[in-house]
Structure formats: C-alpha cells, structure tokens
Image (cartoon, helix red, strand yellow):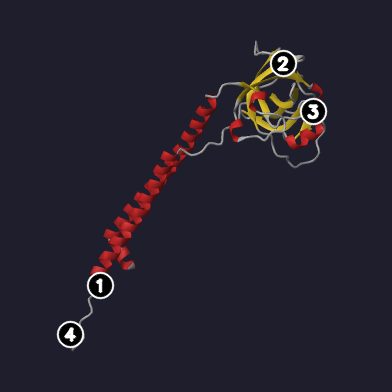
Amino acid sequence: MFRRLLTPRWVGMLAALAVVVAACVLLGLWQLGVARDSGRQDAVAAASTLERAPLEQVTAPHSDFKSDYSNRAVTVTGTYAAGRSLLVVDRRLDGRVGSWVVTPLETAAGTVPVLRGFVDGTPASVPAPPTGVVTVTGTLGPGESPRDGAPLPAPQVRSVDLASLVNEWPGDLYNVVVLASAESAGRTVGTPLAAAGLSRVPPPPLDAPLNLRNAAYAVQWWVFGIFAIWMWWKMFRAEQQADEPVAAPREGATT
C-alpha cells in the first residue's frame, strides 16, 4: 500500500486532494464568518427599527434583564444623585485607559445607573453631572459581574455590579444600565448639555445568532471536503484490489 502511495500518480492525486480539502475548509470558515457578520447586521437592523421609548414603558425596577433589552433606545427623566457617583476603573476606549463615570439617576419609578461616559485615567474626583431635572437619551445594557481584586478607595469600583448597588443605593433599582448618548435639561429631549471631560461610551456589540443560510453553506463546503477524501480512498482501494493476484483454483475444485 505504501509503495503504491509513493508512485508519481498517487503522490500527485494526494497533493490534489490536500488542495481540495484545504480549499473546502477555508471556504467553510469564510462562510461561517459571513454568517456571523450577517447575523450581527440583522440584529442591529432589528434593534434600530424599535422606536425610542421612555424607560418606564420598557421595564420596571427589579425586573429581569431580557435579551432584547440590549441596545434598546430609551429616554429617562430624573435627577442625578451626584454624591453616589462611581468611577469604574480599568476601562478602555479607542486605545485609551481610564474609567467609566456612573451616576444614579433618581426617577419617579426608581433609580437607574447611568453610564455618563469615559474619562482618562483615574481622576481624584468624579466629573459632576448636570443639576436639576435631566432627560437622558441612550441605550440599555446589562449590569456586570463582580471582579476580584484588592479593595479600592471610594468612589472607585471594579464593575457595575447591580446586585451590590441594590443594597447601597436607596429606593427601587432598575436592573439595567443606561449608556448615555446625550443629556438635556428638563423633562423633554432638548438641546444636549455639554459633557465636560467625558467621552460617551458606545453600546456593546450584540450577541447575534448565525445567519442560517450562510451557516448551511459553510457546512456544505465541509461536506464537499469529506466527500473528496472518501472518493480518493475509494479510487485508491479499487485500483489496489484490481492489481491483487487472483488465487489459482485448487485441483479437483468444481465451478
């Protein structure tokens, strides 16, 4: 068998098989990437079709965070509790290292954490939020799990851990984080207020399902690769069996 594999004909066919299988694997991986990208685009497009709604019409304090809340556009009106602002350390934005500024917004229905923006480094004091009644425009995101590490001096924290904040902030707490894109004075969306020293934090990428059509194409390419291996092996065995000597009939044997 091995001597046959080393003949020029089968060395060439083995090389051709390797090229075909490698091409099928790479094309399948490419289609899988297309499936992920297409699914993400579909999810973003679906989220963008939802009209911006007041937070109290989307969810209520202590309600579970649902998957379709991610990147949901909302507005929420209330008053910032500046004294309870947090600096969420060790964050990155566009290659910069710094902190998130999170301030509770007290509304008629409850308190919601608002991620007001990103600030370079770890400042000694938290940038002050607007005073008075403010309407925040933004998108929803989930809270975070706690992160291990040495204790930090207030107001620094390692994560937006809502399970911890519900015991630290008074009143009913919404189980969401609003990523602010703009703030305006008063009870309606108006002229945006300046966010001095802050860079707005974009919404996180959506967890999107695969596009089934492109995923099927990926599987199809891999099946082609398996089929090519099977055909090569079938051809090799057929030629090997054809060249095997046929045993001579024994004396006295009948046909």
Asked whether disc 4 touches disc 2, contact meaning CB atoms under 8 Å apart, the reply is no
Give, as a three-letter code, the residue at label 4.
Answer: Thr
Residue 171, label in figure: 3
Give, as a three-letter code, the residue at label 1.
Answer: Glu
Q: Position of residue 232 (x, y in %)?
A: 31, 58
Calculate the distance from the C-alpha at mark 4 to the C-alpha at mark 1: 23 Å
Residue 244, label in figure: 1
Q: Position of residue 204 (x, y in %)?
A: 60, 31
Disc nearer the start of the sequence (4/1):
1
Give, as a three-letter code, the residue at label 3.
Answer: Gly
Give, as a three-letter code, the residue at label 2.
Answer: Val
Residue that numbered label 4 is attached to: 254
Asked whether disc 2 touches disc 3, contact meaning CB atoms under 8 Å apart, the reply is no
Q: Residue at 71% of width from left, 28% of height from top?
A: 100
Asked if residue 161 can be seen in this view, the reply is no
The residue tagged with tag 2: helix, strand or loop?
strand
Disc nearer the start of the sequence (1/3):
3
Disc nearer the start of the sequence (3/4):
3
Residue that numbered label 2 is attached to: 134
Calculate the distance from the C-alpha at mark 1 to the C-alpha at mark 3: 87 Å
Asked if residue 49 can be seen in this view, the reply is yes
Disc 4 versus disc 1: nearer the observer: 4
The residue tagged with tag 4: helix, strand or loop?
loop
Q: Position of residue 243 (x, y in %)?
A: 24, 70
Disc 1 versus disc 2: nearer the observer: 2
